[in-house]
Amino acid sequence: MLVSGSGSNLQALLDACADPAYGAQVVAVGADRDGIAGLERAEAAGVPTFVHKVKEYPARADWDRALTASVAQYKPDLVVSAGFLKLVGEDFLESFGDRYINTHNALLPAFPGIHGPRDALEYGVKVAGATLFFVDGGVDTGPIIAQVVVPVLDDDTEEALTERIKDVERRQLVEWVGRLVREGWTITGRKVRLK
Ligand code: GRF
């Protein structure tokens, strides 16, 4: 699992994995920075961690290769990005492109990028939500696995909407990571189906 921040999605997965019937385990947590709650959550759960900072590498491609190598070491069935604030490069996508998923806090294809709830609020939409998708070479453009909707309220602030989305986003992530790992999946064009 890859994180850059608070790691509340990671925590939801760690909690779900405590039940053997869930069928998945978080084998490692990687980050692009230190000192984040996400890494502390992993350590508290006894999950190995690694950090690769872009600025520690001469070129972005070197960082990407290092990240790819660290993830590959754990032979994951699925790589989950949740709040990981970096776009991976070609090496990473070649290795994990068919099993690298990300959760985004907007209803794609609307409001890609890092300010999903803010952009949705400013646009005046009446529903918002979260999208789980397979990552491709674009920004929040890959095949969609699942989406969940919440209302936008008249007096919403960015913070209130962000939290309302995160609550359902975590549950969606837990449900679908479990289903993908237990049942397997196919991707045909843009269509994702469970086996
Ligand atoms: C999620 O809402 C994700 O969609 C967004 O950042 C948040 C990550 O939260 N890009 P956390 O670090 O899992 O708490």
Image: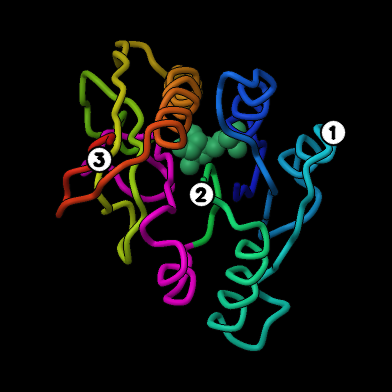
CA distance for labels 1 and 2: 23 Å
Query: Residues in magenta?
Result: 87-116
Tag in front: 1 or 2: 2
Q: Amino acid at mark 1?
A: Ala
Residue at the image position 29 percent from the left and 31 percent from the top: 146
Question: Taking 170 as reference, is 137 above or below it?
Answer: below
Q: Is residue 144 left or right of residue 179?
A: left
The numbered mark at residue 77 is 2
Q: Position of residue 88 (x, y in %)?
A: 48, 66
Mark 3 surroundings within 10 Å by alpha-carbon count, few (fewer than 14), some (14 through 19), many (20 or more)? many
Mark 1 surroundings within 10 Å by alpha-carbon count, few (fewer than 14), some (14 through 19), many (20 or more)? few
Question: Taking 70 as reference, is 129 above or below it?
Answer: above
Question: Taking 112 as reference, is 160 above or below it?
Answer: above
Label whose residue precedes the other's in the sequence (1 or 3): 1
- Nearer to me, 20 or 156: 20
The numbered mark at residue 44 is 1
Quarter of the picture containing the C terminus is top left
Does any atom of ligand 1 lie closer than 8 Å to the CB of label 1?
A: no
Label 3: which secondary element: loop
